[in-house]
């Protein structure tokens, strides 16, 4: 049997490629347009999973899956808005506070333990987020806090992160007690694609989604492919171990995204942000031991 951390490490590699290519696409088209096109691409890719899924599902479980898809749809949209408008070397490390959120949620809802070292790790993660918001300027103690609350895209991102923390706990619950990984992934993305494209059609019409494919050509399909592989690997890892163990390993992708993505998009303060990402890994390690 393949250990859970092999799946988690594989997800880290593909997540790095996913985030960088997603940022590249979002620099050319609007968030809603791109996510409608990407989710539609992913829904078609999910058809490959049909031989492996089991649709004999209790209605209550199906309703729960749809509720998760609604939260995921909202989270994806707000995440994309933040990623489109913020520098990737800033916004991705900020996402490293997710293990702290997940650990707390897992403590309350999955009865996972939360000891003194984990609490210290959570403190380090939030302190690191404060330093990241300072952007290497320490003259005003309150400036990072003011910057966070004045920057709507940082708020969008943390809001999305909170939703993803909740869905991560629900992912763990559903695939442990009710559905296999392939069936759950299939249903989630069929629902997410439906949600996105209905909302997009009502507000903007369907032409913008078609134009997105014309403007960025293969990118929605490529990003969807990276997303599919990443999510399947994450769900498989979650089915084998605690959610609070899987998420910190996924944080490793932030180091690669800051280094590779930051240079690719010619961003500043890359070394500082790389240091903060590494500090967050220390916090995450304390959360998981």
Image: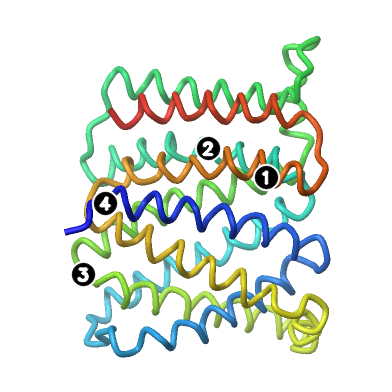
3D distance between C-alphas at marks 4 and 3? 19 Å
| Residue that carries the numbered disc 4 in the rendered image | 4
* Viewer-side residue, 28 vs 162: 28
Q: Residues within 10 Å of mark 2 (few under 14, many from 20)?
A: many
Dot 3 or dot 1, earlier in sequence = 3
- Please provide percent x and percent y for residue 251: 48, 41
* Viewer-side residue, 2 vs 117: 2
| Residue that carries the numbered disc 3 in the rendered image | 178
Image quadrant where residue 101 sits: top left
| Residue that carries the numbered disc 2 in the rendered image | 96
Provide the secondary structure element on which disc 3 rests.
Answer: loop
Asked whether the residues under the numbered discs 2 and 3 touch, taking CB atoms below 8 Å apart as contact, a structural biologist would say no
Asked whether the residues under the numbered discs 4 and 1 touch, taking CB atoms below 8 Å apart as contact, a structural biologist would say no
Asked whether the residues under the numbered discs 4 and 2 touch, taking CB atoms below 8 Å apart as contact, a structural biologist would say no
Q: Residues within 10 Å of mark 3 (few under 14, many from 20)?
A: few
Provide the secondary structure element on which disc 2 rests.
Answer: helix
3D distance between C-alphas at marks 2 and 1? 17 Å
Q: Nearer the viewer, mark 2 or mark 3?
A: 2
Locate residue 115 relative to residue 169 in the image: left or right.
Answer: left
Q: Nearer the viewer, mark 4 or mark 1?
A: 1
Q: Nearer the viewer, mark 3 or mark 1?
A: 1
**What residue do we see at 60% from left, 37% from top?**
93
3D distance between C-alphas at marks 4 and 1? 26 Å
Image quadrant where residue 35 sits: bottom right
3D distance between C-alphas at marks 3 and 1? 39 Å
Q: Nearer the viewer, mark 4 or mark 2?
A: 4
- Please provide percent x and percent y for residue 269: 77, 28
Is residue 73 positioned above or below 240 on the image?
below
Locate residue 94 relative to residue 72 in the image: left or right.
Answer: right
Asked whether the residues under the numbered discs 4 and 3 touch, taking CB atoms below 8 Å apart as contact, a structural biologist would say no
| Residue that carries the numbered disc 1 in the rendered image | 260
Dot 4 or dot 1, earlier in sequence = 4
């Amino acid at each position: 049997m393949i250990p859970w951390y092999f799946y988690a490490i594989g997800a880290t590699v593909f997540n790095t490629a996913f985030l960088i290519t997603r940022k590249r696409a979002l620099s050319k088209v609007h968030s809603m347009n791109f996510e409608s096109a990407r989710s539609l691409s992913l829904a078609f890719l999910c058809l490959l999973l049909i031989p492996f899924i089991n649709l004999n599902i209790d209605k209550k479980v199906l309703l729960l899956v749809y509720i998760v898809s609604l939260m995921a749809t909202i989270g994806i949209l707000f995440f994309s808005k933040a990623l489109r408008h913020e520098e990737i070397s800033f916004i991705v490390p900020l996402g490293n506070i997710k293990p702290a959120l997940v650990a707390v949620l897992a403590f309350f809802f999955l009865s996972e333990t939360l000891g003194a070292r984990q609490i210290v790790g959570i403190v380090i993660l939030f302190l690191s987020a404060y330093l990241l918001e300072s952007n290497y300027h320490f003259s005003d103690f309150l400036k990072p806090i003011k910057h966070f609350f004045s920057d709507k895209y940082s708020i969008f991102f943390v809001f999305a992160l909170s939703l993803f923390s909740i869905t991560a706990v629900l992912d763990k619950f559903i695939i442990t007690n009710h559905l296999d990984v392939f069936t759950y992934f299939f249903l989630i993305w069929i629902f997410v694609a439906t949600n996105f494209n209905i909302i997009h059609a009502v507000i903007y019409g369907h032409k913008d989604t078609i134009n997105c494919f014309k403007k960025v050509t293969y990118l929605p399909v490529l990003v969807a492919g990276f997303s599919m592989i990443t999510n399947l690997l994450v769900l498989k890892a979650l089915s084998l171990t605690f959610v609070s163990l899987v998420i910190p390993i996924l944080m490793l992708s932030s180091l690669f995204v800051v280094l590779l993505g930051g240079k690719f998009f010619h961003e500043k303060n890359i070394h500082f942000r790389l240091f903060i990402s590494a500090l967050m890994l220390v916090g995450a390690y304390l959360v998981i031991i």
